[in-house]
Amino acid sequence: MRKVLVPGTFDPITSGHLDVIERSAHLFDEVVVGVAASKEKKGRGTLFTLDERVELARQVTAHLDRVTVLPFENLLVDFASALGVSAVVKGLRVTTDFETEFQMAALNYRLQPELETLFVMSSPEHMYVSSSVVREIASLGGRLAGMVPRVVEDALARKYATR
Ligand code: PNS
């Protein structure tokens, strides 16, 4: 049984994330989507609460029966050990992702060398989609045009309507 972890902050989950999750589900028997609490992300809080991010991730992966979504507040390597996963899968989009991802993979390797980090190249149509770009477009009332699943688009509209 090959089980992998797809971790992220998912604030909110995008079509690019979903693409990486779906592709991981084709390659492995079981996929756990780990939603990090990430309270201090870049010194600011997240737009969506942890519960909201988990709920959105559950809704958009509901059609994938070997995919489960779980929150985590501890170190990625500890969460991965507790789950018994063989690897962590992350998506790579533009080259600027590389430095951060390379650093995280190297640190995780120092913390737990048995845990592999695997990278999946983003599909070209999702190359420039990120949660931060999506938040900015939604906050300014722009059209998200497939960058996020419909339920996420609706959640963003509700979030910014009440801010
Ligand atoms: O999608 P993101 O926000 O780039 O994902 C980052 C994430 C959640 C994978 C990373 O912040 C993380 O692993 N957080 C858990 C805490 C941890 O283990 N930090 C040390 C990572 S080197």
Image (cartoon, rainbow, N blue to C red):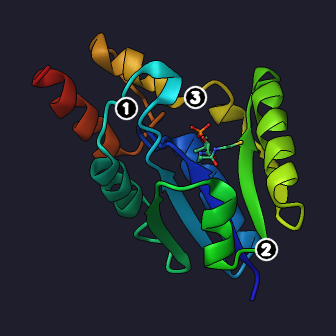
User: Which residue is the site of mark 1?
Assistant: 46
Q: Is residue 137 visible in the rendered structure shown here?
A: yes
Q: In the picture shown, does residue 83 fall above or below 104?
A: below
| Residue nearest the observer in this picture, 109 or 143 | 109
Say what amino acid the circle numbered 2 marks: Ser
Where disc 3 sits, the SS reads loop
The label nearer to you, 3 versus 1, is 1
Q: Is residue 7 left or right of residue 90?
A: left
| Neighbours of disc 3 within 10 Å: few (<14), some (14-19), many (20+) | many
- Let me know if residue 118 appears in the view: no
Residue at 45 percent across and 66 percent down: it is 70
Q: Position of residue 118 (x, y in %)?
A: 83, 55
In the image, farthest residue toward the front: 111
Look at the picture and state if 127 lies above or below 122: above
Q: Which residue is labeled 3 in the image?
A: 129
Identify the secondary structure beneath mark 1: loop
The answer to whether the beta carbon of the residue marked 2 is less than 8 Å from any atom of ligand 1 is: no
Residue 80 occupies which quadrant of the picture? bottom right
* Secondary structure of residue under mark 2: loop
Q: Are marks 3 and 1 in contact (CB under 8 Å)?
A: no
- Give whichever of discs 1 and 2 has the lower sequence position: 1
The residue lying at 69 percent from left, 29 percent from top is: 127
Q: Which of the 4 image quadrants contains residue 33?
A: bottom right
Left or right? Give the position of 23 relative to 53: right
Residue density around tag 2, few if under 14, some if 14–19, many if 20 or more, within 10 Å? some
Mark positioned earlier in the residue sequence (3 or 1): 1
